[in-house]
Image (cartoon, rainbow, N blue to C red):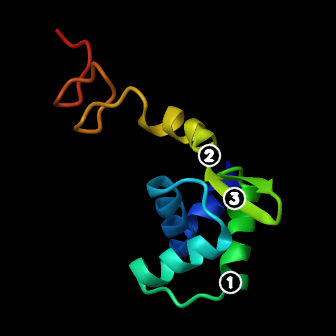
Amino acid sequence: MGDVFKALADPTRRIILDELTDRNGQTLFEICARLTTKHQLGSSRQAISQHLDVLESAGLVETRREGRYKFHYINPRPLEPIVERWLKNRTPGGREDGAEADGERGST
């Protein structure tokens, strides 16, 4: 889980994941172009490639080669343990399901 948090800690990597969520299966060239035009990020191809490597190492991005092209796909599965640990079974107010509003349980 530490690799996932490390990968998500960088704002550029979060934007890359947003872009892959918006349009999955992009090449490095496409990702760089979208980051430049939509987000005004002036990162080099090499820098974006390194960000993608971190995301891939954390399991958040998977790749597939077709000829000379490498396509990048978002993989949300590594986020499931985070959701299970901290978000599942929570009410909109942040309490666990069944928790009393005043913090008391089972008092009569």
Residue corresponding to mark 2: 75
**Gap between marks 2 and 3, in whole Å?**
13 Å
Q: Amino acid at mark 1?
A: Arg
Quadrant of the drawing holding the C terminus = top left
Sequence-wise, which precedes: disc 2 or disc 1? 1
Classify 10 Å Cα crowding around label 1: few (below 14), some (14-19), many (20 and above): some
Q: Residue at x 25, y 12 (%)?
A: 106
Residue corresponding to mark 1: 45
Q: Nearer the viewer, mark 2 or mark 3?
A: 3
Whether pointer 2 and pointer 3 mark residues with C-beta atoms closer than 8 Å, the reply is no
**Gap between marks 2 and 1, in whole Å?**
22 Å
* Image position of 28 with respect to 45: above or below: above
Q: Amino acid at mark 3?
A: Phe
For residue 12, side relative to residue 87 (left or right):
right
Residue 28, horizontal then vertical, whole percent: 66, 71
The numbered disc on residue 71 is 3
